Image (cartoon, rainbow, N blue to C red):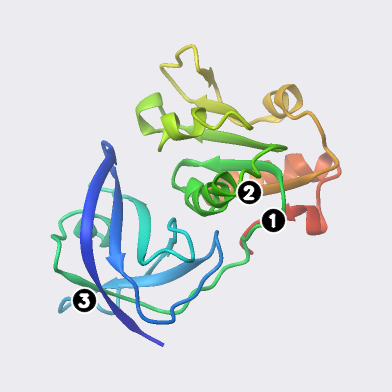
Amino acid sequence: MTHKITLLDRVQLTHDTHHYVFTKPDGYAFKPGQATDLAIDRDGWRDEQRPFTFTSAPEAAALSFVIKSYSDHDGVTKALSDLAPGQTVLIGDAWGAIDDKGPGVFIAGGAGITPFLGILKDRAREAKLDGSHLIFANEAPEDIILQPFWEGRPDLKTTFVVGKNAGPAHREGQIDAALLDDVVDDWEGRFYLCGPPKMEESVAELLAARGVSGGRLIREE
């Protein structure tokens, strides 16, 4: 089913990432971590659907998304960054295999943080972050989405990994075997994984080599 929703607000989070707030259709339901297919409600764009993850609480009165824009090509994310309040987009029903299965290690690359935004924010509201660890990789410190929010959650262990310009709060490099062996305390728990395809496949192989597979690895398939 297709729903038309209206942009209420857009706030810049990083140099290329925005927080979008839209109206919410009556009765619309989703679980933290789930996504929907979204298209801009404009001639020439309605068939250009892209998947985006909800970052608002399921019970909230509005729908929120955190979306990274890629300005190097004229795609949907660039067009979204030009939307003004009052303009509309089209979404389908919610879908997705990533949802809250309990505390664990959340491994994200870049915009792959968005499913975990919904899950970890929901856990923060319920004071259930204890036992969770966020490993978040980005190209540079300025690309880290909501770093102050993550650092402000005392029950959430955080590891920020950057490819360059690391500061005191970061580890320079990538999510490889050496880093995982250094920062992961328990290989018997749950692992959540979302990021660029090559990064996901590489990390999934590393996790499998350490006995993490089946229901203990939560990711989109």
* Amino acid type, label 1: Ile
**Residue to which mark 1 is pinned:** 218
Labels 2 & 1 near each other (Cβ < 8 A): yes
Q: Position of residue 112 (x, y in %)?
A: 50, 48
Residue position for label 2: 193
Q: Nearer the viewer, residue 111 or 178?
A: 111
Helix, strand or loop at label 3? It is: loop
Residue 9 vertical placement versus 211 (above, below): below
Q: Nearer the viewer, residue 158 or 182?
A: 158
Mark 2–mark 1 Cα distance, whole angstroms, equals 6 Å
**What amino acid type should be assigned to the residue bearing mark 3?**
Asp
Q: Is residue 11 left or right of residue 54?
A: left
Query: Within 10 Å of the Cα at label 1, are there few (<14), some (14-19), or many (20+) other Cα atoms?
Result: many
Name the residue at the bottom extreme: 1
Q: Is residue 94 above or below residue 67?
A: below
The amino acid type found where label 2 is placed reads Leu
* x then y, percent, for residue 4: 28, 80
Mark 1 residue element: strand
Task: Tell me if residue 104 can be seen.
Answer: yes
Name which residue lies at 86% across and 41% down.
188
Q: Which residue is mark 3?
A: 41
Real-space Cα distance between discs 3 and 2? 31 Å
Residue 74 showing in the rendered view = no
Q: Mark 3: few, some, or many residues within 10 Å (few <14, many ≥20)? A: some
Look at 53% across and 65% down and name the residue there. 34
Q: Do labels 3 and 2 touch, CB within 8 Å?
A: no
Residue 113's place in the image compared with 179, above or below, is below
